[in-house]
Amino acid sequence: MLMVGPPGAGKSMLAARLPSLLPPLDASEALEVSMIHSVAGALDEGKLLRRRPYRDPHHSASLPALTGGGLRARPGEVSLAHLGVLFLDELPEFNRQTLEALRQPLETGRVSIARANAHVTYPALVQLVAAMNPCRCGYLDDAGLACARAPKCAIDYQARISGPLFDRIDLHVEVPSVSAGDLTLPPPAEGSAEVAGRVATARAVQGARYADEPGPRIRANAEADGTLLERVAAPDDGGRTLLGQAVERIRLTARGYHRVLRVARTLADLDGQAQVRRIHVAEALSYRRAAPGRR
């Protein structure tokens, strides 16, 4: 997920709250995550981790720090966030080469580290959450605060993120600025506990769906691919037509096509629907954002 909005809109706060909506690690997941942290020397007192990891490296982090490396090829932040959340704040401020190295783990769920004395592959199945300002000054949509270079500054700033990396991000969300009136609104009717309950129910449905599938364990829709994804996420006639139109009109790539299917399948699970419907495909498509230079 990529959140785009001005400074102070709450992007970092939303990212930090996400792990609380996810179910705790089960026994096998806890062992899997704890082994990675043990190899990295980050396992506190040798205890198994029960909570999903949340990693938020600074944008000055080096390539080895993010993807892994060093003399002993230790796991990096993307592996330490395995089965949890990797939050990258100020996404365009990261080194371009460092960001491009994330393309492999985002696609395959693992990262390979090649060194002269070692070649190691670590799991890296993460929920990537990134945040960025719409431009360098951050106030593109505020005429009173925007810099004199708008809107060219926004085009240049957002172009720091490559098209292939954009294509691997499933959800693009515009986060509006917070007004004084927003701060005085009553709390929402649905709290974090209720949302976490809906998420747990949807993940349980997904776990049951893939329980009898041969091969490596599939925990959620994010891990389904190929013919399996086509089978479990096949939309109804209206959804299929809409998806076909999107391929033509917004030049949806093959990767984008399958990612829309995954999101639509998850939206249907949250809605308690066995069939992916047109409304789920439409919502999944609404979260796609054109890569810089293709707007």
Image: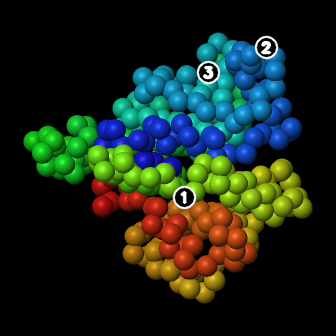
Which residue is under mark 1? 189
Q: Residue 115: where, in percent of width, then height?
A: 64, 21
Q: Quadrant of residue 119?
A: top right
State the residue position of label 2. Answer: 45
Please tell me how crowded label 3 is: few (under 14), some (14-19), or many (20+) other residues with Cα within 10 Å: many
Tell me which amino acid carries mark 1.
Ala
- Which of the 4 image quadrants contains residue 214? bottom right
Secondary structure beneath label 2:
helix
Which residue is found at the position 65% from the left and 49% from the top? 193
The relative height of residue 118 versus residue 217 in the rendered view (above or below) is above
In the rendered structure, which disc, 2 or 3, sits on the residue that comes first in sequence?
2
Of labels 1 and 3, the one closer to you: 1
In the image shown, does 45 or 154 lie closer to the viewer?
45
In this rendering, position of residue 119 left or right of residue 291: right
Name the front one of labels 2 and 3.
Answer: 2
Tell me the residue that label 3 is attached to. 69
Q: CA distance from mark 2 to mark 3?
A: 24 Å
Gap between marks 1 and 2 measured at Cα: 41 Å
How far is the residue under mark 1 from the one under mark 3? 46 Å
For this rendering, which residue is in front, 181 or 164? 181
- Of the numbered discs 1 and 3, the one sitting upstream in the chain is 3
